[in-house]
Image (cartoon, rainbow, N blue to C red):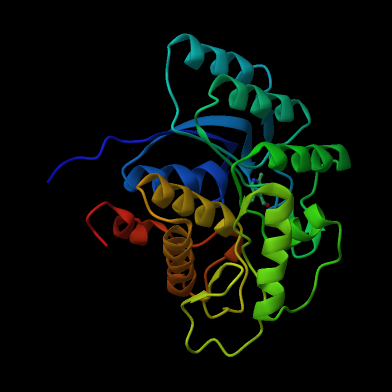
Amino acid sequence: MTQQQPKRILCIHDLSGAGRSSLCAILPALAVMGHQPVPLPTALLSTHTGGLGRPAVLNTDDYTPRALEHYHSLGLEFDCIYTGYLSGEEQLALVRRAFELWPKALKVTDPVMGDGGRLYSGLSRELCQGMRELCGRADLITPNLTEACYLLGRPLPEQLSREQALGLAEELAGLYGQVVVTGLPLGQDLANAGARRGEKGFLAERTRLDTNFPGTGDLFAAVLVGELLRGGSLEQAAELAAGFVADCIAATPKTADTRLGVWLEPHLGRLAPGDR
Ligand code: PXL
């Protein structure tokens, strides 16, 4: 079997030790898909901020700009720069600098700001404004519905028809370029869940399970990025990512502590090249 050259991906996200979010979900997913993720942690946290109390936090603003310049001085090339959770406004400049240093890299921004209609605790309005601007610089953005509504400056709908969902994504695409919106509450009988193509775009539908886990947006975006870099289309990548996340959610025991994220570890092997 011929080996595909691993794609090198600069991952600008936080490292939250427990809870299977951000880099702790992203790094294993990208690596098992055959890529070389290079983490640039925007902060170190003991856990994510979603319900596990107040995490211990270490600011990395003194480290990250120097790490970027070091990578550049080494002549390291990145095929992709993939950005997510930023804990402060300084990090907007960090991402802009990364985009500037590697102009040929595919720029993917997951504008991690909130969920369920609320912003994550500790994120300032200014940071969220800056995130908007960053989305304008990216080649592809992957907001969830809360973030998509924030980017469009409108309230969160409780439910969406397929037509409305495609319309929302189209509106965002008009402003920002390529867009994949996650977590759309379609509220329909999805017994025949699967891929659906409309005139304006596509839907990767899965049956909605009545639980919420932190980190699933990070896992989705990582698999999406991984598949795009393996040469998949946006639609194929979204299907793979939606299926993988849905399978991880379904396979996590009902009694598990949802705050610790989905039990992704037993399933990662399925993402390996040649294992699909
Ligand atoms: O999964 C999104 C995310 C990433 N990073 C941190 C978070 C969250 C969501 O709560 O708190 C630190």
- Looking at the image, residue 89 sits to the left or right of residue 215; the answer is right
Above/below status of 179 relative to 37? below
Q: Is any part of residue 13 visible from this angle?
A: yes
Q: Residue at x 31, y 43 (%)?
A: 34
Q: Depth check: 20 or 28 in front?
A: 28
Give the residue furthest to the top.
73
- Looking at the image, residue 125 sits to the left or right of residue 216; the answer is right
Q: Quadrant of the C terminus?
A: bottom left
Above/below status of 252 relative to 23? below
Q: How many marks?
A: 0
Q: Residue at x 51, y 57 (%)?
A: 220
Q: Position of residue 101 (x, y in %)?
A: 57, 19
Q: Residue at x 61, y 79 (%)?
A: 210
Q: Is any part of residue 51 visible from this angle?
A: no
Q: Depth check: 86 or 230 in front?
A: 230
Q: Position of residue 80 (x, y in %)?
A: 48, 35
Q: Residue at x 67, y 76 (%)?
A: 185
Q: Quadrant of residue 99?
A: top right
- Looking at the image, residue 231 sits to the left or right of residue 95; the answer is left
Q: Depth check: 228 or 58 in front?
A: 228
Q: Position of residue 263 (x, y in %)?
A: 45, 62
Q: Position of residue 135 (x, y in %)?
A: 70, 42
